[in-house]
């Protein structure tokens, strides 16, 4: 009994497309890794030249993850291993670029998360991090970013933007810039004025209080792309 020809074509064409998208995304992720590592090395050198005592670190965490620490912040870059398509209602789907070839809407994704470095240093497991941007990359190495401020507003031309070393450096620098300007705010007084005995005992055990850059405030109020 033979497989239906249309099903056969669908499986192989869709499988090949997703494979191409995966390879484009992985190549881009390796560019991000190399670029971030180089930028941290440059900041380390400037740190020595200025005689300052700030911490700059690059840490490789395997095939699909790495982190960079600069001053009091940490950025995690994570590549998802699966391939996604934009929803029909997404703004990208209305572009001539996608309408000409719907296969262009299939993308790999790289996420960028921001955490406080102290959250890891002092093992504050309840602290929060934020997704500041996610980079969609298709088989043609065109990319689109959904993100906050610098990231979301600067990198949203899916039909013309292609991933290369120059664009990757711009994205990493913009992520660092946004993170540096995204300051830690004190939570409202009324939210922390009462503390139980158990919470007090655990507070200096590192894990009770939740610390985040917008704790008690609406992070969603930041400008979206």
Image (cartoon, grey):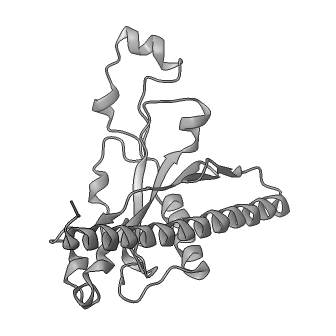
Q: Residue pushed farthest front?
A: 1
122 relative to 86 in the view: left or right:
right
131 relative to 168 in the view: left or right:
left
User: Which image quadrant: the N terminus?
Assistant: bottom left
Q: Nearer the viewer, residue 118 or 60?
A: 60
Locate residue 61, reporting x and y percent: 61, 47
* Quarter holding residue 121: top right
Residue located 26% across and 69% down the image? 8
Q: Is residue 103 above or below residue 97?
A: above
Residue located 25% across and 71% down the image? 10
Is residue 40 visible in the rendered structure shown here? yes
184 relative to 215 in the view: left or right:
right
* Quarter holding residue 48: bottom right
Locate residue 152, reporting x and y percent: 37, 71
User: Which image quadrant: the C terminus?
Assistant: bottom left
Residue located 37% across and 73% down the image? 17
Locate residue 120, reporting x and y percent: 57, 36
Q: Which of 23 and 43 is in front in this view?
A: 23
Locate residue 100, reporting x and y percent: 25, 90
Is residue 145 visible in the rendered structure shown here? no
Residue located 37% across and 65% down the image? 147
Label tally: 0
Q: Is residue 127 above or below residue 97?
A: above
Q: Is residue 217 above or below residue 1?
A: above
Q: Which of 75 and 93 is in front in this view?
A: 93
């Amino acid at each position: 009994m033979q497989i239906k020809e249309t099903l056969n074509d669908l499986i192989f064409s869709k499988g090949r497309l997703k494979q191409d998208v995966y390879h484009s995304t992985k190549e881009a992720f390796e560019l991000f890794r190399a670029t971030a590592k180089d930028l941290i090395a440059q900041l380390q050198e400037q740190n020595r030249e200025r005689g300052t005592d700030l911490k700059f670190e690059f840490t490789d965490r395997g095939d699909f993850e790495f982190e960079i620490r600069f001053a009091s912040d940490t950025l995690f870059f994570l590549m998802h291993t699966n391939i996604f398509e934009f929803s029909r209602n997404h703004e990208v789907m209305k572009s001539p670029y996608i309408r000409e070839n719907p296969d262009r809407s299939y993308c790999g994704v790289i996420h960028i998360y921001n955490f406080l470095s102290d959250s890891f240093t002092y093992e504050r497991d309840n602290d929060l991090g934020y997704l500041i941007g996610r980079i969609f990359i298709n088989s043609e190495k065109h990319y689109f970013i959904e993100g906050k401020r610098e990231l979301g507003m600067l990198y949203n031309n899916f039909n013309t933007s292609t991933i290369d070393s120059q664009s990757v450096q711009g994205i990493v620098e913009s992520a660092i810039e946004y993170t540096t300007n995204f300051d830690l705010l004190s939570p409202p007084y009324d939210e922390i004025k009462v503390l139980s005995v158990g919470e007090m005992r655990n507070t200096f055990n590192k894990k009770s209080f939740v610390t985040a850059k917008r704790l008690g405030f609406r992070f969603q109020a930041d400008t979206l792309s």
